């Protein structure tokens, strides 16, 4: 015997509670490998216009990493040790792992 609701709406299907459970044997697809962000492509890097050449003849731009606040730096000025605040100097091919495009 067909009830009024089934007669009016047609046969209904109850949701299968087991159908929505993921199969434990299937693994999600692996995340694509993150691309390496070098200083040259990082939004925190500020190029300063100097160029350097390595032993193989490759040229690299120099700049400053401005990801964090300036840090104390020590340098020899003649015979004296001087202290100043500044961003770390980096080359365009270097990377830190915190870079952002």
Image (cartoon, rainbow, N blue to C red):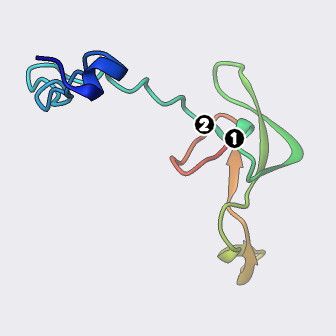
Callout 2: helix, strand or loop? loop
The local crowd at label 1, few if under 14, some if 14 to 19, many if 20 or more residues have their Cα within 10 Å, is few
The local crowd at label 2, few if under 14, some if 14 to 19, many if 20 or more residues have their Cα within 10 Å, is some
Identify which residue, 50 or 77, lies in the foreground: 50
Where is mark 2, residue-wise? 37
Establish if 9 lies above or below 93: above
Q: Quadrant of residue 50?
A: top right
Q: Quadrant of residue 39?
A: top right
Q: Quadrant of residue 23?
A: top left
Callouts 1 and 2 close, C-beta under 8 Å: yes
Q: How far, Cα to Cα, is label 1 from label 2?
A: 7 Å
Residue at the spot x=8%, y=20% of the render? 25
Considering the image in quadrants, where does the C terminus appear? Answer: top right
Observer-side mark, 1 or 2, equals 1
Task: Tell which circle, 1 or 2, labels the residue nearer the N-terminal end.
Answer: 2
Where is mark 1, residue-wise? 101
Establish if 36 lies above or below 1: below
Q: In the image, residue 94 lies at what x, y percent?
A: 61, 40
Residue at the spot x=65%, y=68% of the render? 68
Q: In the image, residue 85 lies at what x, y percent?
A: 74, 79
Q: Residue reaching furthest right?
A: 49
Considering the image in quadrants, where does the N terminus appear? Answer: top left
Callout 1: helix, strand or loop? loop
């Amino acid at each position: 015997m067909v009830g009024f609701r089934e007669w009016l709406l047609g046969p209904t299907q109850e949701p299968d509670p087991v159908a929505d459970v993921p199969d434990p044997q299937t693994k999600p697809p692996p995340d694509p490998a993150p691309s390496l962000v070098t200083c040259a492509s990082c939004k925190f890097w500020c190029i300063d216009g100097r160029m350097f050449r390595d032993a193989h003849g490759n040229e690299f731009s120099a700049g400053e990493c401005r990801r964090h606040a300036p840090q104390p730096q020590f340098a020899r000025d003649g015979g004296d040790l001087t202290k100043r605040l500044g961003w770390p100097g980096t080359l365009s091919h270097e990377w830190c792992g915190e870079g952002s495009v």
